[in-house]
Image (tube, helix red, strand yellow):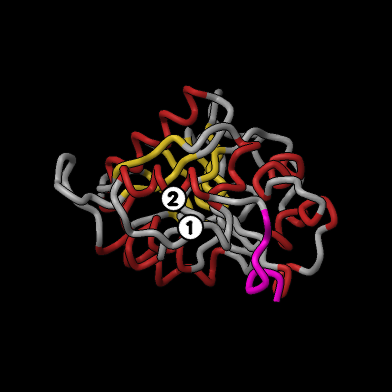
Amino acid sequence: MKIGIIGAGNIGGNLTRRLTGLGHEVSVANSRGPETLSALAQETGATAVTASEAANGARIVVVTVPLKAVPDLPSGLLDGAAEGAVVIDTGNYYPQRDGRIAAIEDGLPESRWTERQIGHPVIKAFNGTYAQDILDRGRPQGTPGRQALPVAGDDAAAKQTVRDLIDELGFDTVDSGGLDDSWRQQPGTPVYGSRDDADAVTRALAQASPERTAEWRA
């Protein structure tokens, strides 16, 4: 499958490593230009491209940049993507890093805000996952205690595509509802940073409160 990854930080870099290792055709971009990704490209066999080119022909596009950078993504970012392309948003809102985003402060889920910025539906996944776990903690399907990741989104088919990809990476998934419910997996909730199995993740999602923690606001 052709996959575009926009953002080559910890999550984007490790997804590039795993997905190329699984045989996917990966294009990866960052904000500094493809020449800065030569080492990652050489290591993985991925193609280093500009952000404008990352989605070209891709069936899945992963947007994994700080929220403050989302409005600066190229216009028409997804124009060249495959028909029916699925967009995964891994982002989190950290006010101390991203500055104050009024709509999110007023209660709009982070990924709904991102969806509006890029003009394309998104599926929220990987946002509470430790980057190293992507490399180290994948296990075969059916392994007892297999780590599970929550996945939120409005399009059932797109969500299933993402869940299938995560299963291929070696993790179970839990459907955490529509995108308006994705606050249940945002920073400061019980599931954020979880390494638990599907049953525990399901319980953690149910325990989530929309109230922001003092630590999150610091």
Residue located beneath label 2 in the image:
204
Q: Quadrant of the N terminus?
A: top left
Mark toward the start of the polypeptide (2 vs 1): 1
Q: Quadrant of residue 17?
A: bottom left
* Residue at x 75%, y 40% (from the top left corner): 116
Q: Position of residue 34 (x, y in %)?
A: 55, 64
Front in this rendered view, residue 206 or 188: 206
How far is the residue under mark 2 from the one under mark 1? 5 Å
Dot 2 amino acid type: Ala
Q: Secondary structure at mark 2?
A: helix
Front in this rendered view, residue 27 or 214: 214
Labels 2 and 1 touching (C-beta < 8 A)? yes
Disc 1: CA contacts within 10 A as few (<14), some (14-19) or many (>=20): some
Looking at the rendering, the stretch of residues picked out in magenta corresponds to 211-218
Q: Is residue 62 left or right of residue 169?
A: right
Magenta includes 212? yes
Residue 73 vs 136, above or below: the answer is: above
Residue 190, disc:
1
